[in-house]
Amino acid sequence: MAEVTILGLGNLLWADEGFGVRAAEKLFEQYADNEKVDVVDGGTQGLALLPWLQQTEKLLIMDAIDLVWRQVRWRCFVMNRFPPI
């Protein structure tokens, strides 16, 4: 079981060109040999990703969304507790 799961989400055909998926691809190159880190290309799989969410201590989700903001903004959401899955 990985201590950290890095989950890249996104659609390669959308305007953001799958930001999370592309970021996960790059990070996989760095962490491929690290047993404590699991890098997952989640694409648009939705609920099929639950096994990875259930088997990790810490989760980093990377995605881009269109919120109609005029300028680019980075947001970091930190949640200390998730409801049980």
Image (cartoon, rainbow, N blue to C red):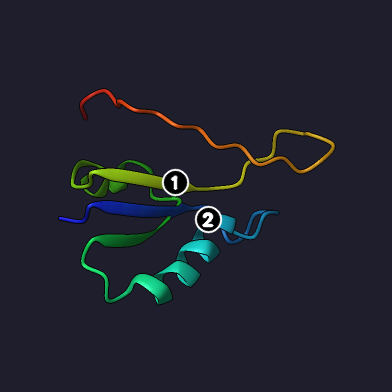
> Which residue in the protein does label 1 denote?
61
Position of residue 6 measured from the top left corner of the image (x, y, whole percent): 38, 54
Q: Which residue is mark 2?
A: 20
Per the image, label 1 sits on a secondary structure element best described as: strand
Question: Which of the pair 83/10 is nearer the observer?
Answer: 83
Drawn side of residue 45 relative to residue 53, left or right: right
Determine the residue located farthest toward the left in the rendered image.
1
- Circle count: 2
In the picture provided, is 34 more to the left or to the right than 15? left
At a point 50% along the width and 61% down the height, the residue shown is 21
Would you say the residues marked 1 and 2 are in contact, meaning their CB atoms lie under 8 Å apart?
A: yes
Tell me if mark 1 has few (under 14), some (14-19) or many (20+) residues whose alpha carbon lies within 10 angstroms of its own. Answer: some
Percent coordinates x, y for residue 45 in the rendering: 38, 50
Three-letter residue code for mark 1: Ile
Relative to 7, is 55 on the left or the right? left
Residue 15 percent coordinates (x, y): 70, 54
Image quarter where the N terminus lies is: bottom left
Residue 9's x, y, as percent? 48, 51
Q: Residue at x 20, y 41 (%)?
A: 54
Taking depth in this image into account, of 74 and 10 the one nearest to the observer is 74
